[in-house]
Image: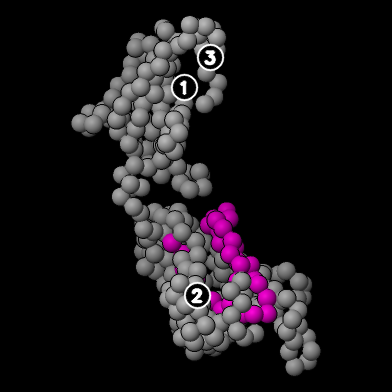
Amino acid sequence: MVLIEAESDRVTRINYDTIIKNVASGGQAVQISNFNDPVGEPGVLRFEWTAEDGAAGKYDISIAYFDEVDGESELTFSVNGQEVGTYVYNLNLPGITAEPRNYVPLSGANSSSTLTAQANPNAIFKGVDLVPGDEIEISVLADSNGNFTDENGNATFELGRLDAIEITPAEITPAEEIIPSLDLFWHNPVSGQVGVWTLNQQGTSVETAAFITDQSGQELLVPENTGFEARGVVDLGDGSRSPLWRNTETGGVAIWKMEGSELQEAITIDPPADGPGSNLDWEIRGT
């Protein structure tokens, strides 16, 4: 688990000021400085994920913040400039400034009992792919619903007040750990080797690359002279992707049922007597 205080030296802050709040985890929090001049200028927090924080993997993101009744600030979470997700401060807890009644802790209920453990939205973002060197950015917009005013009669704003960020390894079920999703299927007709890639959640980098084996762990080879050519992957309705082969001699197809990179069953389908796919003039162009 990595705890990052929003007011710490590790964090680069843009349009965010530090405030003293005893309820905050470090006794301090941050709030947006300029919120209506111009309207829409966000508060931004940036920091780097390092090798000391954790290895490449999936992580859950919890955020301790203040969710007031006078607005609904929108928070955007990004990694390396790519948006991962958004979250709106819409619990509308009592109070129009940061106080214990509207504090949302990293987990559980708050000390004022205005937020139950069951209603706590954390972890807000789950299964986020992080690699050492990634730049994490949290951007928040101030917001006012116009229903509350200060002593001068001006509308009050929810100022995207934020306390801390907690990043923990995501919980992975055994099935997810053993049987990753097959995203790309590869065949080397020269060596006969076959392999699979799984991609990260955003589809921007390779998460795992493995050669396909049989159930004994023996690497499978499909030489070019076998008459089979790789034609992509197909979903047979069970939510998993299976390598698809075309028999260049008969026109039939073969489908490999997989568990991760391990072949479980090879299904062969003969071509029909006539119609689409009945002879080698037909070519597979999609699945």
Q: Give the Cα distance between marks 2 and 3.
A: 55 Å
| x and y, in percent, of residue 44 in the image | 61, 69
**Residue named by callout 1:** 231
Q: Amino acid at mark 3?
A: Glu
In this view of the protein, which residue sits in the foreground, 107 or 191?
A: 107
Check disc 1 and report its element: helix, strand or loop: strand
Q: Is residue 274 above or below residue 186?
A: above
Discs 2, 3 touching: Cβ within 8 Å: no
Q: Is residue 105 above or below residue 277?
A: below
Q: Amino acid at mark 2?
A: Ala
Q: Report which quarter residue 71 is drawn in.
A: bottom right
Q: Give the Cα distance between marks 1 and 3.
A: 10 Å
Discs 1, 3 touching: Cβ within 8 Å: no
Q: Give the Cα distance between marks 2 and 1.
A: 48 Å
Check disc 2 and report its element: helix, strand or loop: strand
**Residue named by callout 2:** 64
**Residue named by callout 3:** 283
46 left or right of 176 in image: right
Bounds of the magenta segment: 60-89
- Circle 3 packing at 10 Å, graded few (<14), some (14-19), many (20+), is few
Residue pictured at 58% horizontal, 77% vertical: 67
Check disc 3 and report its element: helix, strand or loop: loop
Residue pictured at 23% horizontal, 31% vertical: 215
| x and y, in percent, of residue 240 in the image | 42, 36
133 inside magenta stretch = no
State whether residue 161 appears in this view.
Answer: no
Q: Which mark is residue 51?
A: none
Residue pictured at 34% horizontal, 38% vertical: 260
Sequence-wise, the earlier of marks 1 and 3 is 1
Would you say the magenta stretch is mainly helix, strand or loop? strand
- Circle 2 packing at 10 Å, graded few (<14), some (14-19), many (20+), is many
